[in-house]
């Protein structure tokens, strides 16, 4: 890696969960954060304070001399933010799974810095096992991004926009959709006077098991066994919960089809 | 607890995953396992050997003098097995979530010993955090079961047949259905040349997060945000995967409905 591509200074645009975690982590590795730019004060000013940066509320106030501009804004805002950034010489990267690199085509050096993880502001996440998916154009961008990603994670990959979108889709299944199931299960338990925490050991084991077994082999339960009697009892228990019954039927049909057709 | 209700000897009927884990765990706490009874040799003989018990292949060979008979057989077999057991004075318990206690009505002392967990033969599971759901009739059964359950777990509950069935249903959502999602996500990634292990940190964090946040607050993703553009892109990516597309549409509609109606 040429010395002149080394990233020493950062401007973060956005102050949501991804901005919050990545900016603080990069600051923690010794990168100087010049500014945090976000339209509304609240979380952005707090983030700026934590990383000794200046808070600015508009893109035209952005310092044009940073080595890296991290656009950690909602997917739907990337194009707009990219359009309103000043002409900068530094690398401009977004952090989105679904957005192609070429949305940043107006910048000389552009890249993607996508951590495959779910972030909430008030939850510390260990970044070390998190896959960081990088893309860069021209070629000089990639080693510079790799160098900073490797300060955070042991799992840094160069991934095309197409593969990254596929990873993002898989992440939606694994995180968003299973979380919806967990929510439904928690509601059902609490509606019946039991505590949601009773499910935690099972949730943990559901995931831990997959380190040893592919999910296909880890599959258990009434639909997996073709145990129609239990499925019928469960559906009867859900007579007055049409929404949950719909979920139960949907999954049972899918699993029965997968293992018994 | 009266001294004469203390469980010192056990006969296990069944040799599947639940029988395997519970029998070995109870043996580990000092309970003498007299017999393991199962129709086919393979796993039953191995289990019997591990717990210094005698393997028998038919219910009429069962030793009638044990303190506890654990019927760890598939839900659909409990009635049949209960019918073919000799008349015993000891407690007869099943380990099923969905099966009512009264399926064991012919026995003088009957109970349920239900661990809310998923078991695979070759995976060690830490039982200490696992909820053990007990039921017993007459009243003398319960303290005896509680005493042995508390040797295994720090979370022992007395739960009615009705509540236990509800817990079992919630467990199906949390484990079986989310595992099906994980399987679909793994397949999608590997079909696209990526490694399933890239999803592990996200799976873990999805579950770990719920210790801090109820699932409703932990929900993120395109459908949660009402980000129709990303949903449309994902659906387009799934054009040639109708099965996965169906899952994606089902969940996105449910989540959109929950947060945006």
Image (tube, coloured by chain):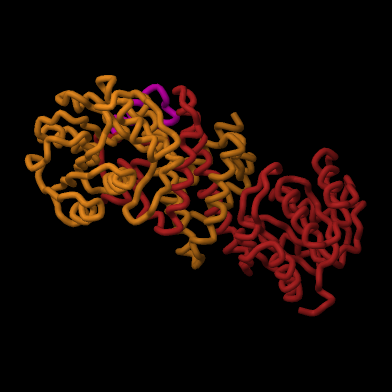
Chain colours: A orange, B red
Residue at left 81%, top 59%? B69
Q: Main SS of the magenta segment?
A: helix
Q: Position of residue B234 (x, y in %)?
A: 33, 31
Residue A87 drawn at (x, y percent): 10, 30
Residue B243 within the magenta-colored segment of the rendering: yes
Q: Residue at x 35, y 32 (%)?
A: A147
Q: Position of residue A246 (x, y in %)?
A: 44, 46
What residue occupies the far top of the structure in this picture?
A: A139
Magenta range is B232-245
User: Can you give x and y, in whole percent of width and height, for residue B201 in the image?
Assistant: 46, 42
| Foreground residue among A95 and B77 | A95
Figure label count: 0
The image quarter containing residue B62 is bottom right
Residue A13 falls left or right of residue B190: left
Q: Is residue B90 magenta?
A: no
Asked whether residue A237 appears in the rendered view, the answer is yes
Q: Is residue A166 above or below residue B30?
A: above
Q: Is residue B160 visible?
A: no
Q: What quarter of the picture does the N terminus of chain B occupy?
A: bottom right
């Amino acid at each position: 890696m040429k010395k002149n591509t080394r990233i020493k200074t950062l401007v973060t645009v956005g102050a949501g969960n991804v901005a919050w975690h990545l900016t603080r982590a990069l600051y923690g590795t010794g990168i100087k954060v010049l500014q945090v730019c976000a339209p509304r004060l609240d979380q952005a000013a707090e983030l700026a304070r934590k990383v000794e940066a200046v808070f600015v509320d508009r893109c035209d106030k952005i310092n044009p001399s940073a080595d890296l501009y991290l656009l950690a804004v909602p997917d739907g805002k990337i194009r707009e933010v990219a359009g309103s950034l000043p002409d900068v010489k530094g690398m401009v990267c977004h952090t989105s799974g679904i957005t192609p690199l070429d949305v940043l085509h107006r910048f000389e050096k552009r890249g993607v810095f996508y951590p495959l993880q779910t972030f909430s502001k008030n939850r510390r996440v260990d970044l070390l096992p998190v896959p960081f998916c990088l893309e860069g154009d021209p070629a000089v961008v990639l080693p510079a991004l790799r160098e900073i990603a490797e300060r955070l994670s042991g799992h840094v990959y160069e991934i095309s926009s197409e593969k990254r979108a596929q990873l993002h889709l898989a992440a939606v299944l694994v995180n968003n959709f299973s979380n919806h199931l967990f929510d439904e299960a928690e509601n059902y338990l609490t509606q019946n006077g039991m505590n949601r925490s009773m499910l935690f050991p099972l949730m943990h084991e559901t995931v831990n098991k997959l380190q040893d077994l592919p999910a296909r082999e880890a599959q258990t339960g009434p639909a997996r066994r073709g145990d129609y009697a239990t499925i019928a009892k469960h559906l009867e228990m859900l007579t007055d919960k049409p929404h949950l019954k719909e979920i139960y039927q949907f999954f049972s049909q899918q699993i029965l089809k997968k293992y018994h057709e």
